Amino acid sequence: MSASKKPLYRIEFMNNGEHYELYVHEVSQSNLFGFIEIADFVWDTHTAIVLDPSHEKLKSEFADVNRTFIPLHSVLKIDEVKKQGTAKITELNDKVTQFPRPIYTPKN
């Protein structure tokens, strides 16, 4: 890898019952305790007529965002990759549970 080329990261995290997969050039531990900071988002440039609605939803959600802070317990995986894939949002299935769960559960 040349010194001028930035590393590319794929970050997967959970948010509001959805699984997010984003591609960014910057990932770091935030100054805010318990958060991961991501920046320099990388988006696909679609040349086809058919567009992925989840990709377009992501682009509009992060349109004016320079950097975002993700709670550490929401991050599923961070990979350094050689090739960019498609950023997407998918629904979580019942097999994925967010960690940690609250210790105190009120009685009915």
Image (cartoon, rainbow, N blue to C red):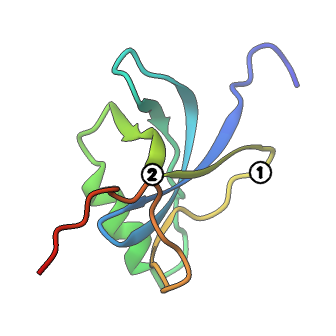
Q: Quadrant of residue 69?
A: top left
Q: Which mark is residue 83?
A: 1
Q: Which residue is mark 2?
A: 74
Q: Callout 2: helix, strand or loop?
A: helix
Q: Position of residue 15 (x, y in %)?
A: 35, 60
Classed neighbour count for the residue bearing mark 2: other residues with Cα under 10 Å, few (<14), some (14–19), many (≥20): some
Total numbered labels: 2
Mark earlier in primary sequence (2, 1): 2
Q: Is residue 2 above or below residue 56?
A: above
Q: Residue at x 35, y 57 (%)?
A: 59
Classed neighbour count for the residue bearing mark 1: other residues with Cα under 10 Å, few (<14), some (14–19), many (≥20): few
Observer-nearest of 51 and 57: 57
Q: Tell me how far mark 2 sits from mark 1, CA to CA.
A: 24 Å
| Quadrant (top left, top right, bottom left, bottom right) of the C terminus | bottom left
Q: Is residue 82 above or below residue 34?
A: below
Left or right side of 104 for 45: right
Q: Is residue 102 above or below residue 79?
A: below
Q: Residue at x 28, y 38 (%)?
A: 65
Q: Nearer the viewer, mark 2 or mark 1?
A: 2
